[in-house]
Image: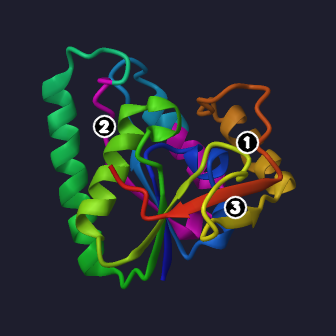
């Protein structure tokens, strides 16, 4: 089974081409700083064209990304994510995983945490992470995926209408996405 494991709803279309996966695992839902976030994110997932492939772990974001004093909350999120991924490993036979890169794409602590735990728990599985460049001057084992921009726009609109979009409003991903094998923390 080919799985995608991401931190937040909308990461699956910002950094990946989600229709290529049998299973899409989304770690975080609730946010302490936005009480409506969980509700809005669930609305978006209910309308998502791939909702039958999506597993929501329902973990609350720690808020550490915006407030470095929330170390205890970060540790709780880390343990909850570790436990949830360990259970998923027992539940599914996963042969290939795509997840966030070791830098969290742009330094996001939740993305880095997901990467770290995926590599820790699924070290025997082929794991790929996004390269945040144009794929030039990279090793030969880079995977190039043609991005379906129409699908991206359709799902982005669902997130926007559900008030669950978290990325730049004018963002359009590249036509080609590049992934490197085994790029863990």
What's the residue at 76%, 43% (across, down)?
173
Q: Is label 3 in a helix, a strand or a loop? A: loop
Dot 3 corresponds to which residue? 49
Secondary structure under badge 2? loop
Who is closer to the viewer here, 38 or 154?
154
> Horizontal placement of 39 versus 153: left or right?
left
Residue, x 36% and y 55% (percent of image)? Answer: 184
Q: Could you say where residue 3 lies in the image, as x and y percent from the top left?
A: 49, 71
Viewer-proximal residue among 36 and 157: 157
Residue at the spot of label 2: 60
For image coordinates 47% across by 43% down, the residue present is 8
Spatial CA span between label 1 and label 3:
11 Å
Relative horizontal placement of residue 139, taking residue 112 as reference (left or right):
right
Q: Which badge, 2 or 1, is on the more N-terminal residue?
A: 2
In the image, residue 12 above or below residue 65: below
From this view, report whether residue 106 is shown above or below residue 147.
above
Q: Secondary structure at mark 1?
A: helix
> Is disc 3 in contact with disc 2, using a CB cutoff of under 8 Å?
no
Q: In terms of sequence position, does the residue under pointer 3 or pointer 2 come before the other? A: 3
Q: Which residues are magenta?
A: 41-64
Of residues 95 and 130, the one nearer the viewer is 130
Q: Position of residue 179 (x, y in %)?
A: 60, 60
Residue drawn at x 52%, y 31% as measured from the top left: 106
Q: Is residue 143 magenta?
A: no
Asked if 162 appears above or below 177 in the picture, the reply is above
Q: Is residue 56 magenta?
A: yes
Could you tell me how far apart the alpha carbons at marks 3 and 2 are, in whole angstroms?
A: 24 Å
Which labelled disc corresponds to residue 156?
1
> Which-is-in-front pick, marks 1 and 3?
1
Where on the picture, by quarter, is residue 22? bottom right
């Amino acid at each position: 089974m080919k799985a995608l494991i991401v931190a937040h709803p909308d990461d699956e279309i910002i950094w990946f081409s989600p229709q290529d996966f049998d299973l899409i695992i989304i770690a975080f839902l609730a946010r302490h700083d936005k009480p409506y976030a969980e509700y809005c994110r669930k609305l978006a997932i209910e309308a998502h064209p791939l909702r039958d492939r999506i597993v929501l772990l329902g973990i609350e974001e720690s808020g550490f990304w915006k407030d470095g004093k929330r170390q205890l909350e970060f540790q709780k999120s880390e343990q909850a994510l570790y436990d949830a991924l360990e259970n998923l490993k027992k539940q599914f036979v996963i042969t290939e995983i795509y997840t966030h890169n070791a830098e969290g794409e742009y330094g996001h602590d939740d993305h880095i945490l997901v990467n770290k735990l995926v590599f820790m728990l699924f070290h025997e599985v082929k794991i790929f992470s996004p390269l945040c460049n144009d794929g030039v001057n990279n090793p030969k084992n880079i995977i190039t995926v043609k991005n379906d921009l129409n699908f991206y726009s359709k799902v982005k609109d669902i997130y926007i209408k559900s008030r669950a979009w978290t990325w730049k409003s004018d963002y359009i991903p590249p036509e080609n996405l590049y992934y490197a094998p085994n790029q863990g923390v």
